[in-house]
Amino acid sequence: MKKKNLDWSNLGFEYIQTDKRYVSNYKDGKWDDGSLTSDANVVLNECAGVFQYAQTVFEGLKAYTTEDGRIVTFRPDLNAERMMDSAKRLEMPAFPKDRFLDAVTQTVKANAAWVPPFGSGATLYVRPYMLGSSPVIGVSPAKEYQFRILTTPVGPYFKGGAKPITIKVSDFDRAAPNGTGHIKAGLNYAMSLHAIVTAHEEGYAENMYLDAATRTKVEETGGANFVFVTKDKKIVTPKSSSILPSITRRSLLYVAKEYLGLETEEREVPLEEVPEFSECGLCGTAAVVSPVGKIVDHGKEICFASGMDEMGPVLKQLYDTLTGIQMGRIEAPKGWIHVI
Ligand code: PLP
Ligand code: COI
């Protein structure tokens, strides 16, 4: 198969239309067989649930080319499960796990020419999503739904690649204690747009959100979880019922313990404690592991001893091991790699 002629090493995190996408429709209580289509446009009634009351959930995963030329995805079963949790919270039907895995496989296979080559630093981002497609005017769930998967080749999420970013403690809240912060719903991102535009205008790459109830504990950013390293090399990640359960974070905790022999802690992290950490990073499918060099809390600067100029040594070890597993250079735990 001949690869597309793209400048793979210089891709940003932007949408590039690929050849095929997957579509399945839910009607009268069941999903149809689903199929691939070349049509990148979605035509829906003006009153569709997604347009009126934002009834939509999504996922994000990546397809990688390994050193030996295979195309693989990383733990797509966890994306399938999380999407079911997200759908349930928004009164949407579950898209079954086996169907999800089959749909990802079909879509990536059909776009194999768009999967960036090994060593380019780029990947094929895979975006499954589901939306309420039938008309709704009183506030209620739609009766019909559409599940789709689009793919787009991407480079690093943050401009400048592995260079540490500066973020700010946001004045806005991302999620309420019993709200929807733990699911991957478009609504969580719509409400973050003003906060991220404000942060960008002020020169910051991202926001650190605090818990909405007390504004004393670290939650996450708009698109990634936090990972901290203590001075004695312990990995600490914030625990909260209102953050997205990041698959990357869960994988990093395992890698830290089982591959690198590091101690790990998943617990509440008071903002007050943050200056004591030696390294800080963001983790997620899009972010991978991105170093944070500085956090600004209303004029007060928190700088990390390791990681102002480049990724600190412990995060680098985590990054190298995780990406090694994803790209097939390091043996993966059983079930983590799904060959397309
Ligand atoms: N937190 C938020 C708000 C996200 O949007 C994402 C991206 O998916 C993550 C965390 C990271 O999750 P994952 O590692 O599963 O991609
Ligand atoms: C991902 O990491 O897959 C996400 O969905 C985050 C988004 C901000 C791009």
Image (cartoon, rainbow, N blue to C red):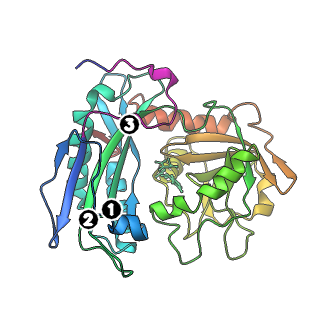
Q: Earlier in the sequence, mark 3 or mark 2?
A: 2
Residue 16 against residue 97 in the figure, above or below? above
- Does the residue at mark 2 contact the one at mark 1 (Cβ under 8 Å)? yes
Q: Tell me how far mark 2 sits from mark 1, CA to CA.
A: 6 Å
Q: Tell me how far mark 3 sits from mark 1, CA to CA.
A: 19 Å
340 sits left or right of 14 in the view: left
Q: Tell me how far mark 3 sits from mark 2, CA to CA.
A: 23 Å
Residue at x-position 23% and y-position 34%: 109
**Which quadrant would the C terminus be assigned to in this image?**
top left
How far across and down, in percent of the image, does residue 194 sit? 64, 57
Residue 127 against residue 70 in the figure, above or below? below
Specify the quadrant of the image occupied by residue 261.
top right
Which residue is denoted by mark 1 in the rendering?
131
Camera sees residue 340: no
Which residue is denoted by mark 2 in the rendering?
145
Camera sees residue 204: yes
How far across and down, in percent of the image, does residue 303 sit? 81, 44
| 222 vs 66, nearest the viewer | 222
Residue type (three-letter) at the residue carrying disc 1 = Leu
Residue type (three-letter) at the residue carrying disc 3 = Thr
Q: Residues within 10 Å of mark 2 (few under 14, many from 20)?
A: many
Specify start and end residues of the magenta stretch as a single range.
Answer: 4-20
Specify the quadrant of the image occupied by residue 40.
top left
214 sits left or right of 265 in the view: right
Magenta span includes 6: yes
| 278 vs 3, nearest the viewer | 3
Residue type (three-letter) at the residue carrying disc 2 = Tyr
Which residue is denoted by mark 3 in the rendering?
152
